[in-house]
Image (spheres, rainbow, N blue to C red):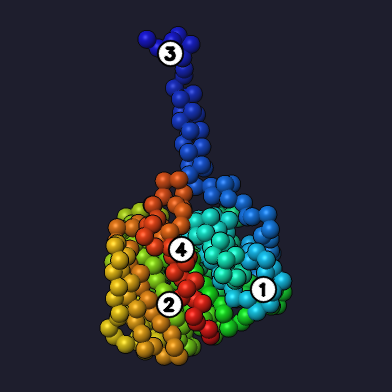
Amino acid sequence: MIPARVRFIPASWWLVISLTLWATRAGAAGNAWARTRPAARDTRQTLLSGGRIRTYVLHLPQGREDQPSLPLVLVLHGGGGTAAGIQRVSGMNQVADREGFVVAYPQGTGWRNITRGTWNAGGCCGYAMNQRTDDVGFLRAVMDEIERTRHTDPAQVYVTGISNGGMMAYRLACELADRIAAIAPVAGALNYAPCAPTQPVSVVIFHGTADQHVPYKGGQGAAAREVRIDPPVSAAVSFWTTQNRCAPAPVVDVRGTVKREQYQGCAQQTDVVLYTIEGQGHAWPGGQRGWRFGDAPSRELSASEAMWAFFARRRR
């Protein structure tokens, strides 16, 4: 029997309660910013780019904070994400501390909440694309500022990112090939055109076959927030192997659910590598879920470890 004190709650009250519970659940699931503040020894940097005040989180490797000529890795969050969130998801700080490189986590732009951003990757996404935000200019300025203030090695600049951030990594390789030694898109699509890099760029790609946001085989993602047709992963591989003048047949290695295809013999000692993760969804392999109900990352491969091993052997 329902107690008398709750039997006659007005219908309008139930609506308020339902909306409050929905908002609380959505906030808890999506608000990586609230859960993942930057580490105490990391610093939030600001700069003026394109008439906007832009920010990024700078992580210096433990014990080597003042060492010059270190490599620089830019890590880009996905659409609607945050710089702090991708720190947690990627676990790149731990790799940087062990291997000795600087990491920058730039923040994209958004409509109402500046802590949740998007990147203008060409064919995606959201606010940044619609407003034609000059994210190439912003990220170039981040590289310039860190090189000037931290004396990083300009021949060892690398870019990675997930989803919309992975798409932005592709665009940077298209437009800043003279600045970037290698990129590592995770669950992203090459949807920027025309892509006309001025020189070869090494590329390592990570993508799950069960991705419903940016489908492995291309098309409209069943879980995508926007109406958008993404090219398949094979189109990115074909473009970069042609651009870098690689041998047509890859060296293939399959371990469990992970298939690694390496295209060798490329111009200027570049490489193109594809990691296909069978059954993985929209996630950072070896990392953390993007949000509470996000796709589970594969535990058979650490994308952060694999991409750093790839980056470390390549200079511009």
Q: Are marks 1 and 3 in contact (CB under 8 Å)?
A: no
What is the spatial separation of the Cα atoms under label 1 and label 3, in whole angstroms? 63 Å
Alpha carbon distance from label 2 to label 4 = 14 Å
Taking the spot 34% from the left edge, 82% from the top edge, the residue there is 263
Q: Amino acid at mark 1?
A: Ile
Contact? badges 4 and 1 (CB < 8 Å):
no
* Distance between mark 3 and mark 2 Cα atoms: 63 Å
What residue does disc 3 label? 7
Report the front residue among 146 and 142. Answer: 146
Nearest the viewer among 253 and 161 is 253
Label 1 element class: helix
Residue 269, horizontal then vertical, whole percent: 44, 88
Which percent across, then down, holds residue 64? 67, 69
Disc 3 and disc 2 in contact, CB within 8 angstroms: no
> Residue under circle 1?
146
First along the sequence among labels 2 and 1: 1
Hey, what amino acid is under mark 2? Answer: Val
Circles 3 and 4: CB distance less than 8 Å? no
Q: Which residue is mark 2?
A: 203
Q: Which residue is mark 4?
A: 162
Task: Work out whether residue 52 can be spotted.
Answer: no
